[in-house]
Image: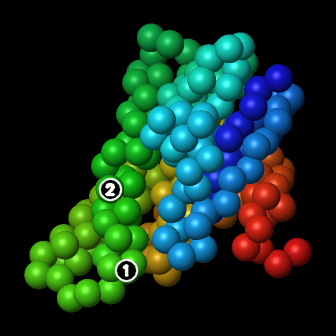
Amino acid sequence: MIKLHHLNQSRSKRIIWLLEELGLDYEVVAYQRDSVTFLAPPELKSVHPLGKSPVIEDNGQVITESGAITEYLIEQYGAEKLAPQRGTQAYVEYLQWMHFAESSAILPLLLKVFVAKDGAEMNFLDGYADVETQKVMSYFNQCLEGKTYLVEERLTGADIMMSFIAEMLHKFGLLAQFENIQRYAALLAEHPAYQKANMLEAEYDSTVTH
């Protein structure tokens, strides 16, 4: 059985969604962020030296990084369901969005998180984060013009990866600025497995009042 080491309020929720979408048997080992620092607990370092989440264990392997975990699980258990056929243009686009989620898309949003947590007046970083967010998210929004999903007009791992970006825009109160992303986020939220992932994440989060 696949074991997911899950950190509350993290990108790990995407892996819960993916596991549910693939209909796989899995076990969740839940960890809680420090209430003051919001950092992951030291217990995660016993799973992987970096002490970050998500991490999965499957067939004796320990696999880290959201994108790598997503690619691994889809290739092993659901390539036809959640990925285009290799060697096609759609597969190239799929890979682009898979990696875009954890590179160009996430960076300016993480900078905004750090700026907000720091709380000090900054000479450069605050403005840079805002400009980059607008640039990158405008590109994402434009790419969704006339589309439902990112690739092949169906749900793929690329959408699962990019769902976190839409969620972060919502948390920053920016989602309404990007009409296509807002529509896309609403579509993703209709998936039963997405809804179950939200429910399970809340159950595993000790900071949520049940």
Answer with mark 1 or mark 2, whichever residue precedes in sequence: 2
Residue name at image x 37 percent, y 64 percent: 109
In terms of secondary structure, where does tag 1 sit?
A: helix
* Residue 130: image location, x then y, percent: 27, 74
**Category of crowding for the residue at label 2, using alpha-carbon neighbours closer than 10 angstroms: few (below 14), some (14–19), many (at least 20):** some
Kindly identify which residue carries mark 2.
107
Q: Which mark is residue 116?
A: 1
In the foreground, 85 or 69: 69
Left or right: residue 200 versus residue 144 is: right
Left or right: residue 134 versus residue 25 is: left
Picture quadrant where residue 41 is located? bottom right
* Residue 156: image location, x then y, percent: 61, 35
* Residue 167: image location, x then y, percent: 56, 64
In the foreground, 179 or 128: 128
**Category of crowding for the residue at label 1, using alpha-carbon neighbours closer than 10 angstroms: few (below 14), some (14–19), many (at least 20):** few
Left or right: residue 60 versus residue 89 is: right
Residue name at image x 80 percent, y 47 percent: 193
Reply above or below: 10 against 29. below
Left or right: residue 109 versus residue 6 is: left
Residue name at image x 19 percent, y 77 percent: 127
Asked whether residue 17 appears in the rendered view, the answer is no
Reply above or below: 134 against 6. below
In the foreground, 148 or 100: 100
User: Quarter of the image containing the N terminus?
Assistant: top right
Residue name at image x 68 percent, y 14 percent: 60
Distance from disc 1 to disc 2, alpha carbons, whole Å, reads 14 Å
In terms of secondary structure, where does tag 2 sit?
A: helix
Amino acid type, mark 1: Ala
Asked whether residue 168 appears in the rendered view, the answer is yes
User: Quarter of the image containing the C terminus?
Assistant: bottom right
Amino acid type, mark 2: Leu
